[in-house]
Image: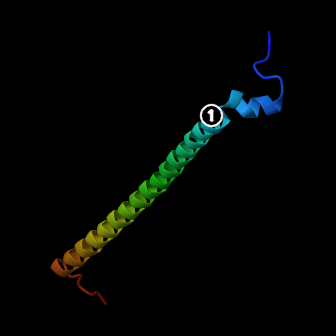
């Protein structure tokens, strides 16, 4: 088996096409990094949205329960005993 490049310098020179090869590598890696960062950001936004919705639903349930208790206590007043 023969190596494709005789030295590291030859590897980085890429047979005279180094500018195009390394530019393509850089664009590809930057695109993947951007995609990863955007996905992480969306993931965090999704979880924040879910937490906001759950907190809102919890507040609504608590308000409905307290309103129900007030309605029940107003319609059935308890008699005071000695």
User: Which quadrant holds the N terminus?
Assistant: top right
As drawn, 74 above or below 63: below
| In-image side of 44 versus 65 (left or right) | right
As drawn, 2 above or below 43: above
- Where, by quadrant of the figure, is residue 52 drawn? bottom left
Q: Secondary structure at mark 1?
A: helix
- Residue farthest to the front, as pictured: 16
- Residue farthest to the bottom, as pictured: 82
Q: Foreground: 9 or 38?
A: 9
Label 1: few (<14), some (14–19) or many (≥20) C-alpha neighbours in 10 Å: some
Instruction: Return the x and y of residue 50 as percentages of the image width and height.
Output: 40, 57
- Where, by quadrant of the figure, is residue 55 drawn? bottom left
Q: Which residue is mark 1?
A: 21
Instruction: Return the x and y of residue 22 as percentages of the image width and height.
Output: 64, 38
Colouring of the image: rainbow
Residue at 39 percent across and 60 percent down: it is: 49
| In-image side of 50 versus 70 (left or right) | right
Residue at 69 percent across and 31 percent down: it is: 16
Q: Foreground: 56 or 30?
A: 30
Instruction: Return the x and y of residue 63 as percentages of the image width and height.
Output: 29, 73
Q: Foreground: 40 or 46?
A: 40
Residue at 83 percent across and 27 percent down: it is: 7
Residue at 78 percent across and 29 percent down: it is: 10
User: Which quadrant holds the C terminus?
Assistant: bottom left
Q: Foreground: 54 or 73?
A: 54
Count all numbered tags in the image, as a single digit: 1
């Amino acid at each position: 088996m023969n190596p494709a490049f005789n030295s590291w310098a030859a590897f980085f020179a890429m047979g005279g096409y180094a500018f195009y090869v390394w530019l393509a590598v850089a664009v590809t890696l930057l695109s993947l990094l951007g995609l990863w960062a955007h996905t992480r950001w969306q993931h965090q936004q999704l979880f924040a949205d879910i937490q906001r919705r759950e907190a809102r639903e919890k507040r609504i349930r608590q308000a409905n329960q307290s309103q129900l208790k007030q309605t029940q206590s107003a319609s059935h007043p308890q008699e005071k005993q000695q």
